[in-house]
């Protein structure tokens, strides 16, 4: 079934025995002080692997196996529960939920007319015993039959009042957890105390609930999801609690002053059938990333007391409820490095480079670290195992180091001494460090990039000259360069007539650079030289590029579903700049570009020259590599310009020789590439022969730096 979750494959009995031991140890730590070595996804894969092995080898099942047991059989307790506190069985998709409901209805012999649908809160189950309205005892789930007394935590749990509204004797059941805010506060307290942090809210809650001798107190949160009378209680209230549908019991719980999910965006509700339940499941899943606390699924329960009673329970889980699991949003991985970048406003932000992990449908390699204070607060070190969080469209973030996985080889993270973009000083007076140049910092870098050799190729604009133009208020971005007047330039220090005229001539020449270079100059993230050429050739005009939506952009080779929306968004941000370039008369077409085969709207083809039939081009479909120094008519061309020539002539420029290479242009001092081409039998020609071959290319085959007619 497509809903099937991934499992860890166990090859033999030794692997099976090791897996069982690992799962038992991890579980004991998970329910104990929260210091498991595995993230939940790794644990769940492992246990599914164990279960699969046991199904295939029923004779080899170890008694210590976690399968079929509450808490994997790894925890015990000495306070008996009045009614067992069980686990929940899982489903992983709409199909499995429907199957579960169908088999439940078969068992009951009637349709289920009310399902209660609630978030599956990601914390620890607890039983809170109230006697005549006073909270007297807190007990963990333990092995389901008996738990551990954690009454010392009374008074530290928001949502679990010391006194109920009425003097009733009742057991409230629910989840103890930390909200994100409580987790942050707890980490700050622990850091101040011993310089370490908690790995995530769940393990912080587990550790905190059981901790008795900590010199600092961390606040917890409780959400109720059930209420039980004592066995043998024959009061009117007890009778009511036994008969009321679950949804109404929860109203009563809230009336007593105990927190329920009712006040949250993922409040429990009652669905009339499984389709409605599935709808609510999807709503809760969609709300997950924005919640102030963690959920790891949705619990669907029979709402009616008689349905629950008749369905009954197995030894590990009730048959009247199911956990609809959501994909994991957290994984443990390694912090490999920290990179520093100056943003558009001059803020210098650290970014974590991670050992890649798959999370919520994508591979995560980078995660945000916010700022220096955040790194210090979390006590992060290079080489740390870290918990990484990502859900939905949220930017992945490093939650915290997994302190108990440290090996001693971790190293301190070094903070930059100077702005990584411009090298100037850093203003560290606030939590967010900034380049002292502020917004101007990025402008210097982006103007410097735009005028570079492979973009607009404007000679005579070194960094200090750009700084001078910015300081004089003559430019705010690189498009402004094209509006500079001779007088303005002559007014600058160290700017004579000759340099002024050279710069103006270089600017004039730059206006005729092809679209691919103009586009590249924009510095859109993820579009370097060759990607810019591909985009320009695909769309032909800037107008067509700007009209393209993410889907249309994705039609360009090498642009995937992640990058496409980024390109669209950045182009929208650059809208004013592009308009200014158009007004300046900068070229907005790609010579020789062919109309996209689909002829999508907005792609009107190049406006200079006729659309070229690409099959008729001299290098049509050929992979061409250039090596050595160019001579003859091509002598002055850079590699980028050579690559542009190749692509204008219908070929594909490549940097390495392989069996797919159709042609090697070998200039002076061609070395290993030539030898490789010879050994592979690839055709080799001189730069002069290549120039002749290209002469057959219509109009567009000229080097890009030719002045406009
Ligand atoms: N990382 C590790 O090493 C490790 C070890 C053991 C278990 N785990 C994780 O724990 C999971 C199994 O844990 P479990 O047995 O505690 O939970 P479960 O998934 O079997 O679900 C039962 C629990 O859900 C909770 N719950 C939350 N909201 C609820 C609601 N609205 N109604 C009823 N119950 C609700 C209760 O605590 C209840 O005990 C595993 O799938 C795994 O992800 C991780
Ligand atoms: Zn700077």
Image (tube, helix red, strand yellow):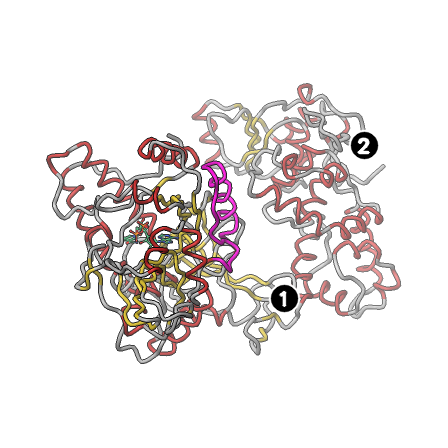
- Residue at coordinates 72% horizontally, 58% vertically from top-left? 461
User: How many dots with numbers?
Assistant: 2
Of tags 1 and 2, the one toward the viewer is 1
Residue bearing mark 1: 346
Q: Secondary structure at mark 1?
A: loop
> Which range is magenta?
262-289
Q: Is mark 1 within 8 Å of ligand 2?
A: yes
Q: Is 277 one of the magenta-colored residues?
A: yes
User: Relative to residue 372, is residue 688 depicted above or below?
Assistant: above
Question: Mark 1 touching mark 2, by CB under 8 A?
Answer: no
Taking the image as shown, residue 105 lies to the left or right of residue 600, namely left
Quarter of the picture holding the N terminus: top left
- Residue at coordinates 62% horizontally, 37% vertically from top-left? 630
Q: Do we see residue 287 in this rendering? A: yes
The spot of residue 561 in percent (x, y) is 56, 39
Q: Is 654 one of the magenta-colored residues?
A: no
The spot of residue 47 in percent (x, y) is 25, 44
Residue bearing mark 2: 608
Specify few, some or many for label 1: CA neighbours under 10 Å numbering under 14, 14-19, or 20 or more: many
Q: Nearer the viewer, residue 400 or 299?
A: 299
Cα separation between marks 1 and 2: 40 Å
User: Relative to residue 662, is residue 483 depicted above or below?
Assistant: below
């Amino acid at each position: 079934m497509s809903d099937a979750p991934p499992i860890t494959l166990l090859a033999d009995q030794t692997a099976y025995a090791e897996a069982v031991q690992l799962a038992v140890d991890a579980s004991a730590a998970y329910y104990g002080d929260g210091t498991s070595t595995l993230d939940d996804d790794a644990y769940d894969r492992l246990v599914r692997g164990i279960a699969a092995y046991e199904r295939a080898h029923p004779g080899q099942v170890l008694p210590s196996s976690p399968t079929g047991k509450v808490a994997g059989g790894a925890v015990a307790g000495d306070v008996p529960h009045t009614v067992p506190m069980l686990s929940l069985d899982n489903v992983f998709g709409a199909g499995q939920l429907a199957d579960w409901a169908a088999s439940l209805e078969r068992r009951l012999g009637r349709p289920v007319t009310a399902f209660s649908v609630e978030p599956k809160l990601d914390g620890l189950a607890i039983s809170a015993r109230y006697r005549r309205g006073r909270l007297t005892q807190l007990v963990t789930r333990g092995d389901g039959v008996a738990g551990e007394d954690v009454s010392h935590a009374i008074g530290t749990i928001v949502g679990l009042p010391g006194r109920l509204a009425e003097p009733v004797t009742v057991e409230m059941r629910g989840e103890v957890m930390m909200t994100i805010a409580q987790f942050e506060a707890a980490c700050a307290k622990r850091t101040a105390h011993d310089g370490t942090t908690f790995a995530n809210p769940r393990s912080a809650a587990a550790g905190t609930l059981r901790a008795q001798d900590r010199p600092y107190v961390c606040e917890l949160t409780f959400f109720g999801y059930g209420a039980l009378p004592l066995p043998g209680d024959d009061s009117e209230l007890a009778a009511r609690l036994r008969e009321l549908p679950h949804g109404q019991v929860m109203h009563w719980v809230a009336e007593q002053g105990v927190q329920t999910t009712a006040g949250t965006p993922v409040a429990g509700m009652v669905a009339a059938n499984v389709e409605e339940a599935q709808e609510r499941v999807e709503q809760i899943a969609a709300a997950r990333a924005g919640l102030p606390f963690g959920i790891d699924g949705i619990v669907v329960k029979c709402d009616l007391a008689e349905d629950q009673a008749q369905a009954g329970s197995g030894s590990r889980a009730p048959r009247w409820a199911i956990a609809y699991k959501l994909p994991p949003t957290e994984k443990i991985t390694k912090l490999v490095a920290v990179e520093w970048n100056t943003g558009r406003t001059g803020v210098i932000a650290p970014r974590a480079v991670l050992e890649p992990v798959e999370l919520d449908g994508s591979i995560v390699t980078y995660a945000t670290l916010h700022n220096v204070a955040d790194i210090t607060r979390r006590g992060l070190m290079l080489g740390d195992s870290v918990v990484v969080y990502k859900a939905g469209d949220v930017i992945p973030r490093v939650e915290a180091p997994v302190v108990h996985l440290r090996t001693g080889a971790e190293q301190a993270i070094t903070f930059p001494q100077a702005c990584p973009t411009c090298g100037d000083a850093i203003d560290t007076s606030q939590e967010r460090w900034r380049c002292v140049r502020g917004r101007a910092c990025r402008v210097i870098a982006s103007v410097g990039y735009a005028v570079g050799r492979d973009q607009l190729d404007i000679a005579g604009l070194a960094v200090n000259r750009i700084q001078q133009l910015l300081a004089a208020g003559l430019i705010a971005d690189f498009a402004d360069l094209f509006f500079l007047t001779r007088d303005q330039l002559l007014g600058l220090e160290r700017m004579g007539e000759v340099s002024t005229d050279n710069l103006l001539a270089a600017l004039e020449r730059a206006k005729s650079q092809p679209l691919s270079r103009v586009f590249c100059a924009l510095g859109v993230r993820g579009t370097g030289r060759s990607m810019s050429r591909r985009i320009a050739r695909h769309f032909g005009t800037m107008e067509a590029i700007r009209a393209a939506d993410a889907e249309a952009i994705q039609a360009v080779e090498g642009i995937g579903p992640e990058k496409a929306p980024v390109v669209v968004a950045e182009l929208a941000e650059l809208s004013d700049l592009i308009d200014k370039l158009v007004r300046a008369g900068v070229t907005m077409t790609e010579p020789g570009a062919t109309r996209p085969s689909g002829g999508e709207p907005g792609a009107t083809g190049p406006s200079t020259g006729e659309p070229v039939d690409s099959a008729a081009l001299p290098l049509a479909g050929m992979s061409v590599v250039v090596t050595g120094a160019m001579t003859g008519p091509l002598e002055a061309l850079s590699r980028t310009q050579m690559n542009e020539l190749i692509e204008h002539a219908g070929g594909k420029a490549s940097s390495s020789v392989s069996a797919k290479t159709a042609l090697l242009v070998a200039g002076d001092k061609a070395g290993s590439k030539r030898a490789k081409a010879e050994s592979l039998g690839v055709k080799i020609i001189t730069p002069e022969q290549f120039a002749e071959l290209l002469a057959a290319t219509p109009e567009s085959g000229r080097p890009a730096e030719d002045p406009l007619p």
